[in-house]
């Protein structure tokens, strides 16, 4: 295998005590996969070459870069202010012409490139469509390979490590983008029923930032708790995706006399049931619900506190939560 890191290695060739003041290069990419026995929308003469894989297995995507003469995972640099997850999906599409749904965060890779530190975030991604690959100056070939074959072909040890981490995962069957409602001012300054409290200017800005992240999972449905601020948080995503917003009381905060654990159990069951359908979904709930629901789904203690306008990318196998990554 090649070594994509600088030959000098970290810090070598610098005067003693010379600080590494250069900010890291940020990049993102993915291990893009599809079932070997169900190639679906990425099959065809323009989809890149395919090697045989065991029936029931998966094929993963590698790209060939003529500038470097290497085989690697698709990736690329973040644009200024771009979210790493959005960059990962964009770069995969630009390099492979494959539309993909992100699922599980994989190991982050760190090395030196062009004399600067470089940080690359990776996600596993399910291929769902393609415009048809056309060779270009940056990438001139795409191959779909079984994981073992990809591990033999890939040029860099750190790409092999990411591939191995993907190979250790169970198959993801459901994806949920779960967000907490955006900022809605202060409860004490709102004179009406709390369920009617709307987003403020900060909240609308957060909602518009969340919309393209929710859209990355290509949801078939959008569901919201009944509070106005939750519905409004999904409004920009609904407009972007041309989807209605469905109100679901199982996502609501506790009502007077209702126990928080009861709400957490209901929300966890609802999220698991949605994931088990196999259709990606976008969901907006509330701050007193999300931590308890995620704790129940994960089956372990942890910090699941979610800020207003924040969220999670959740990956399921059936109705079992495999992984959660903060958005």
Image (spheres, helix red, strand yellow):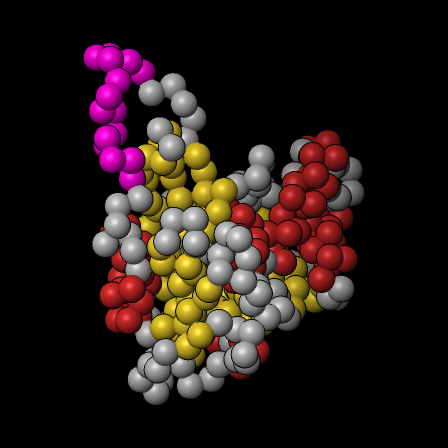
Above or below for 144 versus 188 = below
Give whichever of 135, 114 is nearer the camera: 135
Residue at image point 57% right, 65% down: 134
Q: Is residue 9 magenta?
A: yes
Above or below for 15 versus 237 = above
Residue 227 horizontal side relative to residue 285, left or right: right
Quadrant in which residue 255 is drawn: bottom right
| Numbered range of the magenta stretch | 5-19
Residue 282: % across, % down: 60, 61
Residue 271: % across, % down: 51, 66
Give whichever of 299, 210 is nearer the camera: 210
Badge count: 0
Give whichever of 164, 312 is nearer the camera: 164
Residue 17: % across, % down: 24, 12
Residue at image point 36% right, 78% down: 51
Residue 266 visible at all: no
Q: Is residue 101 magenta?
A: no
Which quarter shows the N terminus? bottom left
Residue 164 visible at all: yes
Residue 281 horizontal side relative to residue 260, left or right: right
Residue at image point 38% right, 49% down: 68
Quadrant in which residue 252 is drawn: bottom right
Residue 185: % across, % down: 69, 34
């Amino acid at each position: 295998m090649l070594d994509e890191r600088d030959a000098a290695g970290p810090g070598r060739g610098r005067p003693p005590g010379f600080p590494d003041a250069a900010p890291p290069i940020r990049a993102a990419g993915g291990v893009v996969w599809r079932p070997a026995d169900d190639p679906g929308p990425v099959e065809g003469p323009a989809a890149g070459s395919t090697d045989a894989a065991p029936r029931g297995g998966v094929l993963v995507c590698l790209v060939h870069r003529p500038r470097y003469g290497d085989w690697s995972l698709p990736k690329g640099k973040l644009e200024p202010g771009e979210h790493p997850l959005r960059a990962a999906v964009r770069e995969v599409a630009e390099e492979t012409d494959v539309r993909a749904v992100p699922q599980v965060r994989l190991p982050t890779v760190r090395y030196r490139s062009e004399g600067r530190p470089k940080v690359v975030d990776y996600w596993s991604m399910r291929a769902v469509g393609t415009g048809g690959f056309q060779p270009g100056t940056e990438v001139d070939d795409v191959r779909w390979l079984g994981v073992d074959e990809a591990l033999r072909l890939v040029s860099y040890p750190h790409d092999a490590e990411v591939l191995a981490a993907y190979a250790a995962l169970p198959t993801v069957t459901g994806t949920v983008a779960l967000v907490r409602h955006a900022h809605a001012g202060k409860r004490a300054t709102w004179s009406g029923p709390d369920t009617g409290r709307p987003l403020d200017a900060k909240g609308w800005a957060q909602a518009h930032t969340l919309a393209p992240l929710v859209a990355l999972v290509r949801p078939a449905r959008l569901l919201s708790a009944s509070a106005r601020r939750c519905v409004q948080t999904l409004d920009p995503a609904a407009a972007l995706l041309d989807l209605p917003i469905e109100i679901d009381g199982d996502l609501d905060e506790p009502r007077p006399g209702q126990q928080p654990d009861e709400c957490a159990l209901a929300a966890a069951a609802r999220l698991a049931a949605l994931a088990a359908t196999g259709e990606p979904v976008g969901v907006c709930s509330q701050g007193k619900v999300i931590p308890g629901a995620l704790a129940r789904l994960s089956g372990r203690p942890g910090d699941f506190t979610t800020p207003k306008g924040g969220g999670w990318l959740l990956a399921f196998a059936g109705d079992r939560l495999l992984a959660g990554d903060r958005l």
